Image (spheres, helix red, strand yellow):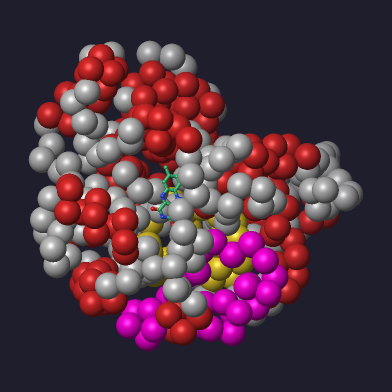
């Protein structure tokens, strides 16, 4: 067992343990993958100012995200097919998040269902919704999230049309994998994954299969989802979701100031500055680059969060310094899960927290609430 000291170690282990098509599904972006790479690279362009001879005892990274107390300004992003990175993956990730003290967000396109997570953790979590043409199906999902005690709804706005990932097409991505010669040969090199999957019955999209009219198995699900992502989604639909839900609403996928203002006007409690981890509009700027202007425009009205490219606690601190009152992590969680299940997600969270805490101290602060852009060397914005 290798010694795990950073998120990259978890990525390397996940690559060894997770079947190629699911590893590639996570570790990829759309088209040239330029935006996907920039999300990480642009964090490195921001430089931190070291301070010395400041009392750094008794530090706190605690804050709240839409009123939910969090041990650090991090939550788990919604990630489709998490249950294919590791058997019962969503349950493992949700348990690790609950034990650590940060929110877990369940994707509409998860393997485990809303009810599975509620039963396994007994803790409130967040549910992510895509806008579907079938509004009755959406209303029922919203109701299920309410019954499961979800304490916030994340509505993703950047998937009206779908960005192409070359790797998924070339791998013939399906869940579960089709029994082709190539897949069988690859699965033979992943015994831990296969054993885990053999030990669980949850191999379907639990939020949809058996719950949506006409969706009873994988092939009817594929047909349904292909025509369900609603390309007509516009602001009155956001209002409709807000009314149906009635609780905290987080709008995810905002990259422009105009859209951030509209999100605030339409009653969002928080927005996530996000380019979907570089999986949708290739050519868009990195999220950390888009963040400052959006904070300036609406940061005094609603909570502004960001995601995309966070692989260290330094990244979390830089996002906070630029005004993000919270972050979401996708791949950092996925790598931990693929590497070691719940223990791997827990390890990823410990790593991020330790790095955040120690970096904050190096910058001369003991309380994250007092950290602002003065910890960054000018220019404070990535160019
Ligand atoms: C995602 N993301 C995503 N977002 C969403 O709203 N619903 C979803 O079902 C998914 N599915 C999904 C699958 C995979 C494999 C990835 C990597 C990402 C986007 C996700 O919530 C988040 O915006 C990004 O993952 C953030 O970037 P990092 O942290 O992965 O760099």
Q: Look at the image and tell me whether residue 129 can be seen.
A: no
Percent of width and height locating residue 268? 52, 77
* Residue at 52% from the left image edge and 31% from the top image edge: 7
Magenta stretch contains residue 247: yes
* Residue at 17% from the left image edge and 48% from the top image edge: 219
Position of 282 with respect to 374 (left or right) is: left
Percent of width and height locating residue 286? 67, 49
Up the image or down, 254 lies above or below 288; here it is below
Between residues 119 and 173, which one lies in front from this camera angle?
A: 173
Q: Quadrant of residue 21?
A: top left
Position of 343 with respect to 50 (left or right) is: left
Magenta stretch contains residue 33: no
Q: Look at the image and tell me whether residue 37 can be seen.
A: yes
Percent of width and height locating residue 345? 39, 37
Labels in figure, total = 0
Between residues 23 and 55, which one lies in front from this camera angle?
A: 23
Which quadrant is home to the N terminus?
top left
* Residue at 37% from the left image edge and 29% from the top image edge: 171
Position of 154 with respect to 183 (left or right) is: right
Q: In the rendered structure, which segment of residues is drawn in magenta?
A: 240-268
* Residue at 43% from the left image edge and 14% from the top image edge: 2
Percent of width and height locating residue 329? 50, 47
Up the image or down, 238 lies above or below 45; here it is below
Position of 99 with respect to 318 (left or right) is: left
């Amino acid at each position: 067992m290798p010694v795990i000291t950073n998120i990259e170690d978890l990525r390397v282990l996940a690559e060894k343990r997770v079947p190629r098509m699911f590893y590639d599904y996570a570790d990829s972006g759309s088209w040239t993958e330029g935006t996907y790479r920039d999300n990480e690279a642009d964090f490195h362009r921001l430089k931190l100012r070291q301070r010395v001879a400041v009392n750094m005892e008794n530090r706190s990274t605690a804050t709240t995200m839409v009123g939910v107390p969090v041990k650090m300004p991090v939550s788990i992003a919604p990630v489709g097919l998490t249950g294919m990175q590791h058997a019962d993956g969503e349950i493992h990730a949700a348990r690790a998040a609950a034990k650590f003290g940060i929110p877990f967000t369940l994707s509409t396109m998860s393997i485990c269902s809303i009810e599975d997570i509620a039963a396994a953790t007994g803790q409130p979590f967040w549910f992510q919704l895509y806008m579907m043409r079938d509004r009755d199906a959406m209303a029922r999902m919203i109701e299920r999230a309410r019954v499961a005690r979800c304490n916030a709804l994340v509505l993703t706005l950047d998937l009206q049309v779908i960005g192409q990932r070359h790797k998924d097409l070339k791998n013939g991505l399906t869940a579960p994998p089709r029994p082709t010669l190539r897949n069988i040969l690859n699965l033979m090199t992943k015994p831990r994954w296969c054993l885990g999957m053999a030990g669980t019955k949850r191999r379907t999209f639990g939020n949809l299969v058996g719950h949506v009219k006409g969706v009873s198995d994988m092939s009817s699900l594929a047909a349904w989802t292909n025509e369900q992502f609603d390309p007509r989604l516009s602001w009155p639909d956001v209002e409709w979701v807000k009314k149906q839900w009635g609780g905290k609403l987080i709008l995810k996928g905002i990259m422009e100031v105009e859209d951030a203002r509209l999100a605030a006007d339409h009653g969002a409690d928080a927005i996530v500055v996000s380019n979907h981890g570089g999986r949708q509009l290739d050519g868009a700027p990195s999220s950390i680059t888009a963040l400052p202007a959006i904070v300036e425009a609406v940061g005094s009205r609603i909570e502004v969060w960001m995601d995309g490219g966070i692989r260290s606690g330094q990244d979390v601190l830089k996002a906070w310094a630029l005004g993000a009152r919270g972050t979401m992590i996708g791949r950092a969680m996925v790598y931990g899960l693929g590497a070691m299940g719940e223990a791997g997600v827990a390890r990823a969270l410990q790593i991020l927290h330790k790095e955040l805490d120690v970096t904050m101290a190096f910058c001369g602060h003991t309380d994250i609430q007092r950290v602002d852009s003065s910890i960054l060397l000018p220019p404070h914005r990535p160019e």
